[in-house]
Amino acid sequence: MTDPRHRAVIVGCGNIAGLYEKPHGSLSYSHGRAFSDHPSFEIVGCVDSDIRKAKEFSEKYGIKCYDDDIEKIIYLAKPHVVSVCTPDSTHYEVTKRILSKISSDLKLVFLEKPACQYQRELTELVSISNQSETPIIVNMSRRYHAWYRWLKENYNRDQFGALIRVDIFYYGGWQHNGVHAVDLVHFLFGETLTNGKIVESWLGPEDSDPTYTVRCETKHKATPVWFHGFSEKHYQIFDCDFKFSNARLQISNFEEKIELQKLTVNPLGERMLATHDSHLSRPTISPIGRAIEIIDEYLNYLKKESLVGCTLQDIERTMNVIWDIKVENNA
């Protein structure tokens, strides 16, 4: 009897793939855990340039097929979806190799962020994806987080008023982690960022990817948007402070806490902010868990509407902001 589950292959068997995540827990935060926790998927193969790591990963998740050769695993395992969890600088070449071995079985590539290193790489991957009719979706994790989706919906319904300022604190390299912050603003408010200027700079984990403090503004309304770089030698941080004309929303410590304040007028006629119950509880599914649900829906019905907001094309303007800042700094 044919197994009705979707077949998944994971390329790159390190941290984000799930090598070090505990096999059980409340929520999944890696590709391996997310696929193995979902009843519609089976991980049928894994690949790593370090064969020992591939073997260790296969033993952890009960995967029968492992190797250091991508083409070999795709041929043997015949996956419906391939997750690319390799180092940032390899995303383009690895994804290109996967798509060059296209078969009737492969239906989607799930690519870790940042999608690639250069504009020409993104343009070529989009072209190959279109030609092969194999969508590439990107793990911009906050697009899948319930709190940010709630914020986007309520902003679009004018529940907070006009956006007047954004401050986001991040660590770990402008391209590697700053991409989350830039993409979040694009996702939430639908405004393209422009006029980016570097204010401060620190060495990041990689010498080629410093951590910048950058001031941008939205293209149409010139709303100030600040991305505050922070040196991880102190600690890791991801905090968001969104100020609107009628409210303020803070999401802090990697989505550990959310606080909503709304405009009120005190007896003296002063405009103040008062804490307001957002009625939001902790999400019952992790961002990557939600991404796997979206992949499942797409594989079941092959309707591209399922992938709206998740594809490589959707994050192109985010990558352009990242690259524009890097080019300006190196000019």
Image (spheres, grey):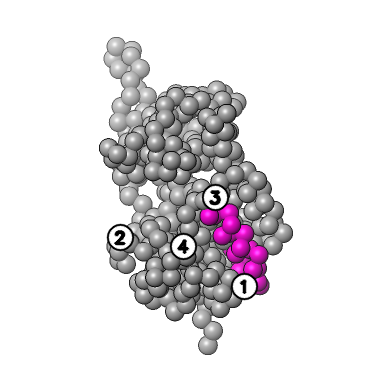
Above or below, 142 relative to 159 = below
Q: CA distance from mark 2 to mark 1?
A: 32 Å
Crowding at dot 2, Cα within 10 Å, few <14 / some 14-19 / many 20+, comes out as: few
Q: Is residue 104 magenta?
A: yes
Q: Is residue 142 visible?
A: yes
| Front position among marks 2 and 1 | 1
Q: CA distance from mark 4 to mark 1?
A: 21 Å
Residue 81 at what x, y percent from top left? Answer: 55, 66
Crowding at dot 3, Cα within 10 Å, few <14 / some 14-19 / many 20+, comes out as: many
Q: Is residue 28 magenta?
A: no
Compare marks 4 and 2 and give the one earlier in the sequence: 4
Task: Tell me whether the residue at label 3 lies in contact with that at label 4, contact meaning CB atoms closer than 8 angstroms.
Answer: no
Compare marks 2 and 1 and give the one earlier in the sequence: 2
| Front position among marks 3 and 4 | 4
Compare marks 1 and 3 and give the one earlier in the sequence: 1
Residue 280 at what x, y percent from top left? Answer: 35, 45
Q: Report the residue marked by disc 2.
A: 26
Q: Report the residue marked by disc 1.
A: 105
Crowding at dot 1, Cα within 10 Å, few <14 / some 14-19 / many 20+, comes out as: some
Under mark 2, the amino acid is Ser
Q: Report the residue marked by disc 4.
A: 12
Residue at horizontal 56%, vertical 41%?
A: 319
Under mark 3, the amino acid is Ala
Boundaries of the magenta span: 90-108
